[in-house]
Amino acid sequence: MTDSAPDAPDDRTAAAPARARRRRALVVAAGLAAAAVVVAGAAVLRDPPRHGGLVILYGDSLSAEASGAFVEALRRDTDAEVITRPVPGASPCDALPQMRDDLALEPTVVVIQFVGNNGSPCTRGPDGRPLTGDALAERTVQDVRTATEMFAERGTRVVLVGGPDAPGLPGGATLQIAEGYHDIAHGWAGRDLGRVRYADAAAAVTDGGRFVDRLPCRDGEGPDEGCVDGEVTVRNPDRIHFCPVEPEGLTCPVPSPGARRFGEEMARVAATALDPDL
């Protein structure tokens, strides 16, 4: 009987386990890659972080009109607590005592908006007459600078709001005051970038800084918001305020696109200031 040599292994049979291992490795790698894509996609789609803290708004009648939109926008986009303290007809010198008291609240952000009223005793000159023009602007900006230093030196971020041109105001200093606020913010940029910011809310209700009573409708502003022939009324006939008609007391009886635009722009900058990384 002749011994026969064992059959030589078939090359394809010997290679099968190796091919199977490679396939499994490819499947695992593909799964990991897909998971990475999902994770990356989730990171892209994730809602931006909602920052908290305390925001306080100080101002005059323009802030009083816009405070509803201001609060609504901050509640929509942040987790901040919001306190509004506008007083119609007020000047910064009227608000300083309240501001000093509010230091104890340790606000995260304060928003300061005063357009240039001159009816308070603290805005009168040595002769007892209301300040106007450059003298009123100098007094207003000086008081806002005091408030800014008071808050910013304690770590609070400050938003200074440039008010819109208001030809109906007897003080005649709106534009000079807005320029002074801008200068304060610019000066702080070299000391602590981001500590003091300028909100050009006036741009939302003017035509390049120039007073107009109507502007093109925005998305979401339809007939119910007063959009007619592609435009909405953003300023009051008194050439100061926002309500499109004569208000009933302090409440505008119709939608006020100007107040909404002004309030939302103040809120946008305040929300940015809540972000500790910006």
Image (cartoon, grey):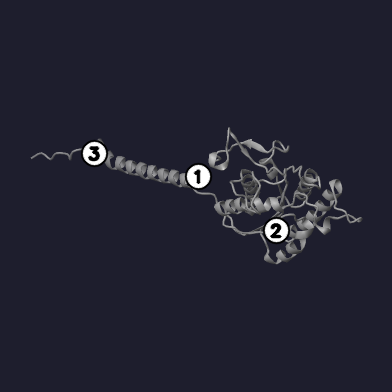
At x 60%, y 54%, the residue is 71
> Looking at the picture, which amino acid does disc 1 mark?
Val
Foreground disc of the pair 2, 1:
2
At x 57%, y 52%, the residue is 72
Residue 86 position within the rendered picture, expressed as x and y whole percent measured from the top left: 69, 56
In space, the residues marked 3 and 1 are separated at their CA atoms by 47 Å
Q: Assign a secondary structure to mark 2.
A: loop
> Looking at the picture, which amino acid does disc 3 mark?
Thr
Examine the image and state in which quarter residue 122 appears. bottom right
Q: Which residue is mark 3?
A: 13
Q: Do the residues bearing badges 3 and 2 touch, measured as CB atoms within 8 Å?
A: no
Mark 3, other Cα within 10 Å: few <14 / some 14–19 / many ≥20:
few
Foreground disc of the pair 3, 1:
1
Mark sitting earlier along the chain (2/1): 1
Instruction: Evaluate whether residue 248 shows in this view.
Output: yes
Residue 19 position within the rendered picture, expressed as x and y whole percent measured from the top left: 30, 40
Tell me if 183 is positioned left or right of 261 in this view: right
Q: Which residue is mark 1?
A: 44
Q: Nearer the viewer, residue 145 or 189?
A: 145
Q: Nearer the viewer, residue 23 or 156?
A: 156
Mark sitting earlier along the chain (3/1): 3
Say which mark, if any, is on residue 156. 2
Mark 1, other Cα within 10 Å: few <14 / some 14–19 / many ≥20:
few
Q: Assign a secondary structure to mark 1.
A: helix
> Looking at the picture, which amino acid does disc 2 mark?
Thr
Residue 231 position within the rendered picture, expressed as x and y whole percent measured from the top left: 61, 35
Instruction: Evaluate whether residue 278 shows in this view.
Output: no
Mark sitting earlier along the chain (3/2): 3
Tell me the quadrant of the picture where the N terminus can be found: top left
Total numbered labels placed on residues in the image: 3
Q: Assign a secondary structure to mark 3.
A: helix
